[in-house]
Amino acid sequence: MKTKLNNFVVLDCETGGLDRKNQEHARVVPMTEIAAIGVSADNFQEFGRYVSKLKGQYVGEDYVGYRPELIYQEQALKFTGVTIAKLEREGKSVKEVVEGLIEIFVMTKTGSHLHKPVIVGHNVTYDIPFIQDIFDFDKKDLSKYLSGWRDHTGTFHPHFLDTMWMSRQKWNEEGMKHNLGALCERLGVDLFDAHGALADTVATFECFKKMMIGFRTGAMHVGEVNEGVARTRITFEM
């Protein structure tokens, strides 16, 4: 009998603040954009995509996040090319974004409650707290939709695979870079519109696919991985 695999949801968040590496980012800055792609673990085919900006709110004359304590940083907005006007014009409410993500999570699930999707991202421990926070804000139970575990305080943490850490394990020479741009260059993946949520998600997916196929086929080098991708594509198209 074939064992069911947990499918993947590849995602990326853009935020209104720069990462200070203190793990408090989701408490002080708002998410500005999120993209997610549901992917089959068997053949890496897509189930669907979701992308949206997240609207903030005015408190007096100040534009803040969906929680008043979430403050946009001008430098971060310039870095990602997102403006307050764009957020107001194109952004959706937390409830709408959560509903969009749930739709992707549900369509990516294999059918068994034991095989919910696993999150994939690049430096994804930065993104996960933002997902946790919008689900908490909308009073939705994230554990119903994603594979994960609860810690001793009862907090749910999704299972995840991080392409940045996969890169560090595979290419561990001193001085090598492991940001998404460096990984894309190493694997021959195109990265357009870096720091856009959907572009980064698509690039992360392509990198993840190549590394996973390399892992499954035993390929050690980029050329061998590319051959493995081609063999896998042919196999699943037959």
Image (tube, rainbow, N blue to C red):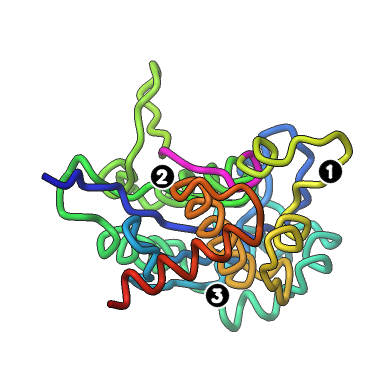
User: Can residue 238 be seen?
Assistant: yes
| Residue stretch in magenta | 159-165
Q: Earlier in the sequence, mark 3 or mark 1?
A: 3
In the picture, the quarter occupied by the N terminus is top left
Residue 176 circle label: 1
Q: Is residue 203 left or right of residue 174?
A: left
Residue 49 circle label: none
Residue 91 circle label: 3
Farthest top residue in view: 152
User: Can residue 56 be seen?
Assistant: no
Residue 92 vs 157, above or below: the answer is below
Residue identifier under label 2: 136
In terms of secondary structure, where does tag 1 sit? loop
Q: Amino acid at mark 1?
A: Met
Q: CA distance from mark 3 to mark 1?
A: 37 Å
- The reply to whether dot 3 and dot 1 touch (C-beta < 8 Å) is no
